[in-house]
Image (cartoon, rainbow, N blue to C red):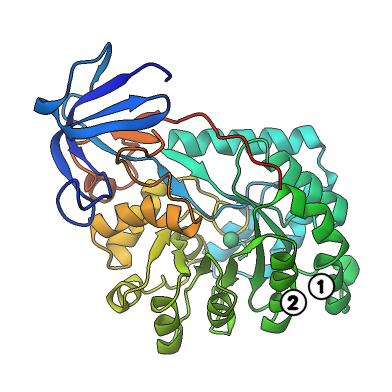
Amino acid sequence: MNETTALLNIGSLVTNDPELGEGLLGLITDAALVIEEGRVSWVGRSSDVTPTTAVIDLEGRAVLPGFVDSHAHLMFAGDRADEFAARMSGERYAAGGIRRTVAATRAATDEQLAENLWRLAAELRRSGVTTFETKSGYGLTTIDEARALGIASSVTQETTYLGAHVVPAEFEGRPDDYVELVAGAMLDSCAPHSKWIDVFCDRGAFDVDQARTVLLAGVAAGLVPRLHANQLQHGGGVQLAVEVDAASADHCTYLDDLDIEALAASNTVATLLPGAEFSTRSPYPDARRLLDAGATIALATDCNPGSSYTTSMSLMIAIAVRDMRMTPDEAAWSATLGGAKALRRSDIGRLSVGSRADIVSLNAPSHIHLAYRPGVDLIHRVWQAPLTPKVAA
Ligand code: NIG
Ligand code: FE
């Protein structure tokens, strides 16, 4: 995509820049977009575009910024379909299932882990995702966490060290010893491959004090915090995320008024992961309450083999609209610019001059069809600017 390319006859273009078009999405109808050297160089009405050498006629299709999946767990081996089936027969989801994936992941070769990652990365791309984050968290030894992050760094710059996912079996009854390892030697080995640090702060995983210890050690090592918070029950996770200025508090399923106020008054994005509630048959988070209070929402897949084995951002949008009372505009925004904000990125999630040319076209005339046509693969084409090499930490 090094030459100048014009995308013409876009039926409706989501720019996510309210100065360029209508409403929250900065929507332009009968639009065109010009791409130069992997960046957007012009946006406007089709009738105003200057002709260029390469032209792609979108024939009235909708165009959006590529989806930004700001929360996924792709560094694993194995399968837990049996747990899903048991849940659908009435079992409750428990964090302990993570240890089964840990056993399978430790037993896998580097090649097997890389192949599984590539398979899921290809699935994400086919579903319109042009930037994704991935976490470690299924190795839980210094060597296994560092190798997962090393492999992940070859496909995304959004890598998250999640050594504090659960306490592994060999540390049973000694959680504080494990926290010391995660915040010490394991962090030293993982930090060079990571941008973010995360903790699963919830029932069956880590408490608020343990999570704070790990996050602050990560900050001291140059990583930026994000946090799994309030997924399985109400607790202090969201307040901790705000306290440490985390880029996002993820899940946010069980929130009280103080949590919502704290999120709304902070820089911490509420990342909602409805695939987890869908696959664990749990109540969905109350997106409407968060939005009405002024909080920023990202939607992401949480792709993982235990609680949300999906790469479909379109499904997240459909659930958010149907069951979480988000409007189609709000859901499209949260799956694009909301995700970018959760990753503290200003170069993605919008299509205005200078943005990365990460673009999706739909086999539909408008983004509303993402929720209006649930379960239908509407992705027509995906353009992705070349990955910017990671600057060594
Ligand atoms: O985000 N909540 C913690 N981690 C994952 C689940 C991981 C698993 O069950 O394997 C999640 O839902
Ligand atoms: Fe998660």
Q: Residue furthest top?
A: 53
Q: Position of residue 84 (x, y in %)?
A: 58, 58
Q: Position of residue 109 (x, y in %)?
A: 82, 37
Q: Amino acid at mark 1?
A: Val
Residue 104 in sight here: no
Relative side of 101 to 4, left or right: right
Ligand 1: give its quadrant.
Answer: bottom right
Residue that label 1 marks: 179
The residues tagged by marks 1 and 2 sit, at their Cα atoms, a distance apart of 8 Å
Relative side of 155 to 217, left or right: left
Ligand 1 within 8 Å of the CB at mark 1 = no
Marked residue nearer the N-terminal end (1 or 2): 1
Q: Residue at x 23, y 49 (%)?
A: 372
Q: Amino acid at mark 2?
A: Thr
Residue that label 2 marks: 213
Crowding near pointer 2: few (<14 within 10 Å), some, many (20+)? some
Hey, which quadrant is residue 31 in on the image? top left
